[in-house]
Structure formats: C-alpha cells, structure tokens
C-alpha cells in the first residue's frame, strides 16, 4: 500500500518563516496555474516584496520515454522521440537519427542533409514564434500572443507541403529523409520567408521597441556568463549571456558547413537579451531557408540503412531551437537500444535564483525565457507535457 | 574533417600522467568523443582537474546506465568546454561504476553545479545515492511513490 499523498495547501501562501537575517519571510506558490502557459510551479520565498529564494517544481511530467525506447525498434521509436517537445519535433528527430547513424556508420547523401537542415530551420522559427507568443502572454501583451501564433501557420503549412504533417513529421530516418521536395516548394518558401521578415519589423515596432516592454525586460533575471556556463546552459539562454556557442558552427553537421549565417549573442544576460537572441535567430533562419532552396544539390535523398543497431556507443547532438539536444545511445547488436537517455540541456534548479533581489511582479518577465526552457527541457528528458507542448 | 585523434590522445595522456592509478580505462570513440572510466573514490579529483586544468567547464548532462547482468550501475557525466573555443565540439564522458547492491557515489554538484537536477533524476529513477548532494529528493515522481526505481532494467512494463 502506498502512503497517502501529502495534503496540498489550499491557499497560495504556504508558511511564514524567519530567514537567517531575522526578517520574516513568506513562501508563495507561483503556479501550477500562473500568468503564462505550461504547468510549472515556482516556490518563491519573499521578504516583503523582495524575492529571497526560488525553487522550481516541474510537476509530474515524466512519462518514461527512455524506458519506452528501450523496448522498441530504433525506427519505431522515431514518433515517440518527437513527443517531448513537439513544437521542435524535427530537431529532436535529428539528434536521434544522428546517434543511430554514428553507430551504424551510415553516410547521408548531400541532398538528404540539405532537406534535414531545411526542416530544422523551419522548426526553429516555429518554436521561437511559439516561445514569443507565450512571452507576450506573460507580459499581458495580447497582440504579441496572437501575431506570432498566426504567423507560425506560414511555416506549419510549408512543413505540411514538405513532409505531409503539420507538427510531428517523423521526416528524418536513418540514412536520409522520407520525401523529396514537392514541386513549387522553393518559390513558396522564398515568398513566405520574405513576407515573414516584413512581419518581424512589425514585431519590433509594436513590441521590442516599445518602452512598455523594454522597461520591464531590461536588467531583469540577469544570468552572468560564468554562471550560465557552470549551470550547463546551452542554446539561446547561453548566447543571451554572451557566449557565442552554437553547435551549427562549433560542430558543423548536416548542411550547415556550406551555409552562410551568423551566430547571435547579447552580452547582458537579462530577459531582454534572451528575447533579442530569439529574434535574431528567426532572421538568420529565414536566410538559411532561402539559401537551401537555392543551392540544394540534386541526387538521392536517402541511403539504405540497416534496422539493427550494432554494438557501440554514440553521443549525437544537434543545436535545436531551445538548446542543445543529444542522445547518449548504447547499442548491443539487436534492433533495440540498450539505453538511450536524452541528455537535453536541463537547467539547474538554481537557475531560478536569477530573479532574487527583484520584486515579485517581474517574475514572469525575468524567468519566462528561462522557464519555458525549464519546463520543456525537463520534459525533454523522457517526459511529456499534456497536449504535447 | 581530419581523422587523426591528436587532441584526444593528448587529453588522455595528460589524465594518465596526473592520475596513473585512478584512470581505469580510456576509449576514443571517434573524433571529439572520448570516454574515461575512473575509480569512484577519485572521480571528484579527476573532475576538478578536468575543470581547472583542461578547461572542461560545461556540464552537458548525466546519464545512469543499469548493467544488471554485470551487477553494476554506470554513471556517465557528459562534459564539454566553453572556455576553450577549439574544444567546443568535444564531449568527454567521465564514467564510474558502482555495485548494484550498494549504489552510493560522491556528488559532483560542488564541481559543476549544473549536474544537480541530473543527479536527482538518477537518484529517483535508478536509486543511486549521491553523497554530498544539496537536495537529494524526488524531482518527478509522486511524493508517495514507494515502488522500485522505475528506470532500472529489471522493472518490466505490462506491455513488455
């Protein structure tokens, strides 16, 4: 018999304590229902209005996907692999097939590499737009919630043309990709990315250059360069703290070595910097998509790969939209992996300490860029949020 | 891409020179991927050396692997370097083995604070205890979970 669950406090104020300095502090539960999206709880300790301590509680998001993978053929695991973060499905898929190919020693044809890169970059834009819309919700900016979600449809439709699916594509398979470019795709992609770049200027005008936003985002939730590295941050969080680390440049894979793009960094490490890194990356992704459809080589899209995983070990990683995503894959000669932990860049609980010293009101602004990450990245490790986001 | 492993060989050499008795096994999987197996009681010293002298300042993750047929757990710290720009493509797997019936190791949170939640996850999913961890309690499982650690190999699902 299992022990009865702990009683859940009915009020948001949990207890009153005396801190080390002798001041009386309150422990508040911010969430699981809060001003944004995603069920995520922060246990915040405040002294008056000033936060003195924060502990994140990700909730019951572990669905044991690591265990599910161990029981299935490596190909049958592909749709499962995408589930932990479906708004960035193809990048997770890419990390998985890269690990498999590393053990199998399979080379992907160049056209296949370009098509993989194309879908990855479209996914990066979709994921950043989703992020941006929820950022808008957190700030109470309804327009910034609706516009990005509307514009995300541009790329969802494009992905549907390419793969046949809108969100979870299962497009990358060991050895290459499933389908070739449909007719007329290049023109459509150029048209849509050019329109989208105009929309990004509108975003700047209504949101990013708006004092209502900048005054609430600058200097909030500062994460220093040293701290970001020590905590193992990757992706836009790390680049927002001034480190120019990007696996697309540092460990070039797929078609990235042949494409021209910049790595965006901002030195300040605050909420504003992280937001601007996302904006820059969407512009760069548009550039990459246009380059790909222009110079994609002809040839086969996939090479035959075995459906067994030979004995061996691989650590395949890619720069996904939110952070580095990697699989530590162990093969033992059968068609199932012995073990495949998804070593996504989960954030340390201590990252939540960045709003310490602020008042309680900027919590959503300061930590949202981090915490969407916390929710989704903890989720990446084998877990899943309800509804797939 | 060059096929030589000079950089990886040099790293292995430096580790072996400084810890001749404690490095049990090294393996260069391919360019930019290497595994180093260390005695559990010395892993902290090796980790501090890797961080301070060789530039491995960035923890990428921690994976626990259950080798139940060999009656042991393996704990793998995936670490990389941000400080040394030329080494950013390199991932070093720092490994240690513990017997399955007494899974207790030292925590590396004091070396890389980013491994805190990974170690907590290995604790609840595999039942491995990390000595010196600041907050070794459940992260994902329900508070009243009293079953065995669910990701161990001997746990079977009904669909299995």
Image (tube, coloured by chain):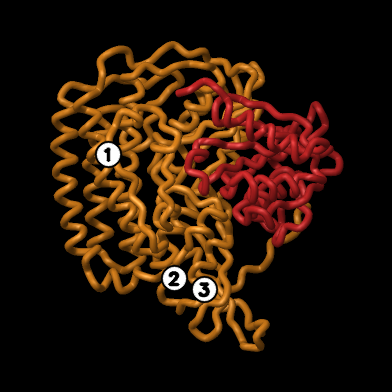
Chain colours: A orange, B red
On residue A363, which mark appears?
A: 2
On residue A356, which mark appears?
A: 3
Where does residue B53 sit, x and y in percent of width and height? Answer: 64, 47
Residue shown at 66%/20% (left/top)?
Answer: A332
Mark 2: few, some, or many residues within 10 Å (few <14, many ≥20)? many
Q: Are marks 2 and 3 on the same chain?
A: yes
Query: What chain letter is assigned to the residue under label 3?
Result: A
Q: Is residue A378 visible?
A: no
Mark 3: few, some, or many residues within 10 Å (few <14, many ≥20)? many
Q: Nearer the viewer, mark 2 or mark 1?
A: 2
* Image quadrant occupied by the C terminus of chain B: top right
Helix, strand or loop at mark 1: helix
What distance separates the C-alpha of mark 2 from that of mark 3? 9 Å
Query: What chain letter is assigned to the residue under label 2?
Result: A
What distance separates the C-alpha of mark 2 from that of mark 1? 31 Å
Query: What chain letter is assigned to the residue under label 1?
Result: A
Q: Is residue B16 left or right of residue A200?
A: right
Q: Are marks 3 and 1 on the same chain?
A: yes
Q: Nearer the viewer, mark 2 or mark 3?
A: 3
Indicate the quadrant where residue A335 lies: top right
Where does residue A203 sit, x and y in percent of width and height? Answer: 20, 58
Helix, strand or loop at mark 2: helix
Where does residue A253 sit, x and y in percent of width and height? Answer: 41, 29
On residue B1, which mark appears?
A: none
* Image quadrant occupied by the N terminus of chain B: top left
Residue shown at 48%/43% (left/top)?
Answer: B85
Residue shown at 78%/52% (left/top)?
Answer: A1
On residue A156, which mark appears?
A: 1
Q: Are marks 2 and 1 on the same chain?
A: yes
Q: Nearer the viewer, mark 3 or mark 1?
A: 3
The image shows a total of numbered marks equal to: 3
């Amino acid at each position: 018999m299992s022990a009865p669950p702990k009683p859940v406090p009915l009020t948001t104020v949990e207890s009153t304590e005396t801190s080390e300095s002798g001041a009386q502090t309150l422990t508040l539960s911010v969430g699981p229902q809060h001003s944004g999206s995603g069920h995520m709880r922060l246990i915040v300790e405040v002294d008056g209005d000033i936060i003195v301590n924060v502990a994140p509680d990700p909730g019951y998001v572990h669905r044991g996907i690591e265990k599910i993978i161990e029981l299935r053929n490596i190909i049958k695991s592909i749709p499962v692999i995408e589930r932990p973060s479906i708004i960035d499905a193809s990048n997770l898929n890419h990390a998985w097939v890269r690990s498999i190919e590393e053990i199998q020693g399979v080379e992907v044809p160049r056209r296949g590499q370009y098509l993989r890169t194309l879908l990855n970059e479209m996914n990066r834009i979709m994921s950043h737009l989703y992020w941006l819309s929820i950022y808008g919700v957190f700030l109470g900016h309804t327009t910034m919630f609706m516009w990005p979600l509307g514009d995300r449809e541009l790329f969802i439709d494009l992905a549907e043309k390419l793969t046949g699916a809108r969100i979870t594509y299962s497009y990358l398979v060991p050895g290459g990709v499933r389908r070739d470019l449909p007719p007329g795709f290049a023109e459509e992609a150029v048209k849509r990315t050019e329109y989208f770049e105009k929309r990004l200027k509108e975003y700047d005008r209504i949101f990013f250059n708006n004092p209502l936003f900048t005054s609430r985002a600058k200097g909030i939730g500062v994460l220093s360069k040293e701290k970001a590295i020590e905590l193992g941050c990757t992706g836009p969080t790390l680049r927002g703290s001034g480190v120019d680390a990007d696996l697309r440049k540092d460990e070039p894979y797929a078609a990235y070595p042949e494409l021209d793009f910049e790595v965006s960094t901002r030195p300040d490490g605050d909420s504003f910097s992280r937001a601007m890194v996302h904006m820059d990356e969407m512009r760069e992704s548009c550039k990459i998509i246009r380059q790909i459809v222009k110079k994609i080589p002809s040839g086969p899209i996939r090479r035959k790969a075995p459906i067994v995983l030979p004995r061996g070990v691989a650590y395949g990683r890619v720069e996904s939209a939110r952070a580095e995503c990697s699989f530590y894959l162990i093969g033992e000669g059968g068609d199932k992996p012995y073990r495949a932990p998804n070593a996504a860049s989960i954030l340390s609980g201590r990252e939540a300490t960045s709003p310490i010293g602020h008042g309680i009101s900027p919590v959503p602004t300061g930590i949202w860029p981090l915490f969407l990450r916390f929710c989704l990245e903890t989720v990446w490790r084998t877990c899943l949020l309800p509804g797939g986001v | 891409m060059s096929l030589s492993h000079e950089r990886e060989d040099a790293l292995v050499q430096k580790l072996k020179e400084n810890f001749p008795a404690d490095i049990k096994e090294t393996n260069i999987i391919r360019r930019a991927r290497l595994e180093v197996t260390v005695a559990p009681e010395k892993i902290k010293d090796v980790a501090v050396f890797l961080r301070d002298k060789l530039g491995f300042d960035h923890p990428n993750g921690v994976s626990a692997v259950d080798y139940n047929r060999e009656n042991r757990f393996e704990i793998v710290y995936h670490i990389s370097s941000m400080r040394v720009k030329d080494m950013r493509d390199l991932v070093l797997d720092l490994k240690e083995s513990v017997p399955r019936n007494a899974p207790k190791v030292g925590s590396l949170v004091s070396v890389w604070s980013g491994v805190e939640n990974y170690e907590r996850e290995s604790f609840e999913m595999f039942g491995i205890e990390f000595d010196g961890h600041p907050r070794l309690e459940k992260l994902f499982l329900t508070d009243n979970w009293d079953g065995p650690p669910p990701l161990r190999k001997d746990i079977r699902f009904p669909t299995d």
